[in-house]
Image: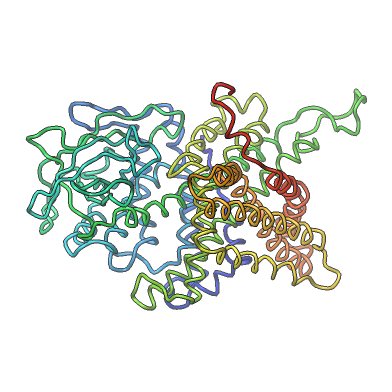
Amino acid sequence: MRHYRSNVRDLEFTLFEVLDRGKVLGQEPFGDLDEGTARDVLRQVARLAEEQLAPSLLESDRTPPVLDPATGQVSMPESFVGSYRAWVDAEWWRLELSAELGGAAAPPSLGWAVSELALGANPAVKMYAAGFTFAEVLYQLGTAEQQRLAELMVEHRWGATMVLTEPDAGSDVGAGRTRARDAGDGSWWLTGVKRFITSGTAPFYDNVVHFVLARPEGAGPGTKGLSLFLVPQRHVDLATGELGERNGVDVTGIEHKMGLKVSTTCELHFGEDPARPAVGYLVGGVHDGIAQMFRIIEYARMLVGTKAIATLSTGYLNALDYARQRVQGGDLARTGDRHAPRVTITHHPDVRRSLMLQKSYAEGLRALMLYTACQQDTVRAAQLATGREEVEPGSEADAARRLNDLLLPVVKGCGSERAWALLGTESLQTLGGSGFLQDHPLEQYVRDAKIDSLYEGTTAIQALDLFFRKIVRDRGVALGQLASEITVTLRRAPDDDPLATERARVGQALQDVQAMVEHLLGRARAWQTGGPEDPEAAGAVYEVGLHTTRLLLAVGDLVVGWLLLRSAEVAAAALAQDPGGSDADFYRGKLAAARFFTREVLPRLSADRATVLDSDSELLALPESAF
């Protein structure tokens, strides 16, 4: 079954008509890629995704990987192996690499648009190929020898993993107990057990480089005591690139999962055989593990959010295609007329409501992802211009960096939560009982997408990060910048504005979010003033914790509504210029999505505001036995 349905038209619309990426492409430092070339890239990748990546998705779910415990090798369907090799051989991943590693000078917004196509068609393909991005991070952070290893990772197409989670620690990374002992020769010996390690083994890798957080002997507790080590699955001769003996890191099991089954989620044991130590190397020669790993984590969070949004998009388009063909029942207005003709279910009001809810979120969340990627464009351009990773404080690039940091947990958290809920309650539901069958891809989409709200920090963790790190620690600078950009849109209304009602609704949503933030900031200040022993102060921070997820989703809905409004502005102008054009219905759909979302979704934020402002910490005082 060719399940995947791309939406190149909407990618192009959002990138070039709404976000003006044509003004960035073809200009230094992205001079080698103009808008026409970028459009051609999107069409070529969409064809690859539909014809070579997507077909193996269903078989790889029905025939998951099998581990040989004796060798640590894994087998999986040849169809999936073929899809992976097709992606690697096409080399579109070079859009994400620097020139030093053989990459193309491409803005991240184009890279993430390309990633959406691969992630929607067969997400595990893109996830297995993350080793290229890990190599880029290593090249930026590593010593000269480690930069050579990064070059070999790209040249030989090796895999890579991020290794944080331990069985007893879970999301509490600072509680990790994996140890590292200085071997005295520039290497370290690691011992410990890690779990939930994505892409830990695959039949198309000759080698896997594990990026492992471990605690050196004598280091303090918590995350500050962790360092980042490179532990290759097989030893490497850096001079020749030849592989040596197996290192002392072993895949001891593959998790049996609800979905995304072809992705090998592994348990790793380090240094269990005294005769075969797990030899690792300190990244950059410095003990700065959490900050270094966060370079990878932030990429992974953007990846997971994009994966969720891509799956929602193809889920909606599958549901739409089914609804256009499925004939069932008569028109509601002719209820009681036994002779009324049967109609396709797109004629039924609630099906239309469901489809427009899916459309508005799928396209609005795509806009959120690409808008966030545009901030990365600005940062990357500054880095290439100066040759430095750090951007100038107070510069345009610094403001973009702050805004990107603010939005990352929203892309990941809101994207994953809204996508999974809509796939299950709306996309699958559109197909009725047929959606519950494996005859259609929706049931697998639902299972595969659930992991997105758990990966790389659960939604609650994303929400705490948004509030405490991206709002409180930033002193609201980035949030204020976002509010200013929204306000600009609200104030540029023309005379006889056809979107006046939609602007007013987005304005109200902005006020609702600002009121929630102000209230939670007040409770956070009460906690900081009172101290850890003050029960009233504890109650204040508990109130914050009860509502940060609500805030994250509200911020996401606000930004989605705003970007749908911006899209509607473009569509209204296009229709005014050419009301009978070939794209007229596309633009009418944009207007309808903005009107629907601002009318049906954004008013919920006023209820959220009332809930937050009327909160207390009584729930935390309830004894566990009462649950």
Work out whether residue 362 or residue 290 is closer to the camera in this orientation and state it: 290
Residue at 32 percent across and 36 percent down: it is 166
The number of callouts visible is: 0
Left or right relative to 589: residue 416: left
For the residue pair 240 and 344, the one nearer the viewer reads as 240
Foreground residue among 410 and 529: 529
Question: Could you tell whether 568 is left or right of 303 in the image?
Answer: right
Q: Quadrant of residue 500?
A: bottom right
* Image coloring type: rainbow
At which x and y percent is residue 93?
37, 56
Residue shown at the point (32%, 30%) measured from the top left: 254
Q: Position of residue 281 (x, y in %)?
A: 18, 52
Tell me if residue 159 can be seen.
Answer: no
Residue 289 coordinates in the image, percent (x, y): 29, 53
- Residue 436 visible? The answer is yes
Q: At 75% across and 34% down in the image, what residue appears?
A: 345
Report the quarter where the C terminus lies. Answer: top right
Q: Which image quadrant for residue 295?
A: bottom left
- Residue 559 vs residue 335: left or right? left
Q: Position of residue 315 (x, y in %)?
A: 59, 40
Q: Residue at x 11, y 55 (%)?
A: 186
Depth check: give the residue in front, 458 or 358: 458
Up-down: is 391 above or below 348?
A: below
> Is 73 rendered above or below residue 540?
above
